[in-house]
Amino acid sequence: MDTLRSTVFVLMLALVSVGPAAAQELESFGVIGGMSRTTMGGGFFELVKDVGGTVNPRYGVALGGYASFNLAPNTSLRGELLLTQNGVRIPTDGGLRSRDLDITYFDASGLVRRAFPLESIVP
């Protein structure tokens, strides 16, 4: 399983790190950052609440970068790579032991954007 996970991770990095083709033009690039607040639900978390426990959110960060490339007039491709922290905290109360679930992952995404000039829509 670790070999499969490593292979997928390397393939994702390879896809994100591919440089633009000669026909593409770098429009903009930059960084993305913010704070995340996450809590979870489901059967286990409902059971914790049923026995008198509480489920607290986890606060984390979201950091990454983006690059936007012009593909054609009014069409661009924006790729993003984002590191996100999620999870949940279950404090010691109601006779329960303290539990922390911390999840940190990379999110790679791509977005094709097409702009329509206002003159082409409004007569």
Image: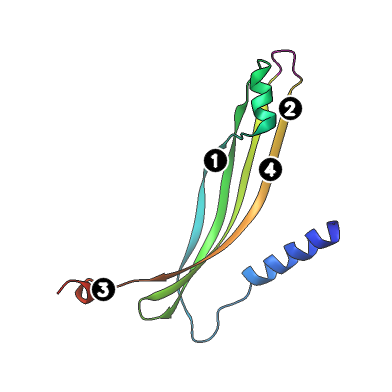
- At x 85%, y 57%, the residue is 1
Residues at badges 4 and 2 in contact (C-beta under 8 Å)? Answer: no
User: Dot 1: within a 10 Å radius of its alpha carbon, few (fewer than 14), some, or many (20 or more) residues?
Assistant: some
Kind of residue at disc 1? Ser
- Answer with mark 4 or mark 1, whichever residue precedes in sequence: 1
Q: Tell me: 83 left or right of 31.
A: right
User: Dot 4: within a 10 Å radius of its alpha carbon, few (fewer than 14), some, or many (20 or more) residues?
Assistant: few
- Answer with mark 3 or mark 4, whichever residue precedes in sequence: 4
- Residue 7, by quadrant, is bottom right
Label ID, residue 4? none
Q: Secondary structure at mark 1?
A: strand
Q: Main secondary structure of the magenta part?
A: loop
In the image, residue 64 lies at what x, y percent? 57, 55
- At x 68%, y 24%, the residue is 47
User: Dot 3: within a 10 Å radius of its alpha carbon, few (fewer than 14), some, or many (20 or more) residues?
Assistant: few
- Residue sitting at the far left: 123
Question: Which portion, as a residue range, is magenta?
Answer: 92-96
Residue 95 belongs to magenta span: yes
In the image, residue 111 lies at what x, y percent? 49, 66
Vertical placement of 29 versus 24: above or below?
A: above
Foreground residue among 72 and 97: 97
- Answer with mark 2 or mark 3, whichever residue precedes in sequence: 2
**Count of number-bearing discs:** 4
Label ID, residue 103? 4
For disc 1, the marked residue is 36
- Answer with mark 3 or mark 1, whichever residue precedes in sequence: 1
Q: Marks 4 and 1, Cα distance to the nearest angstrom?
A: 12 Å
Vertical placement of 114 versus 91: above or below?
A: below
In the image, residue 87 lies at what x, y percent? 65, 37
For disc 3, the marked residue is 117
For disc 2, the marked residue is 99
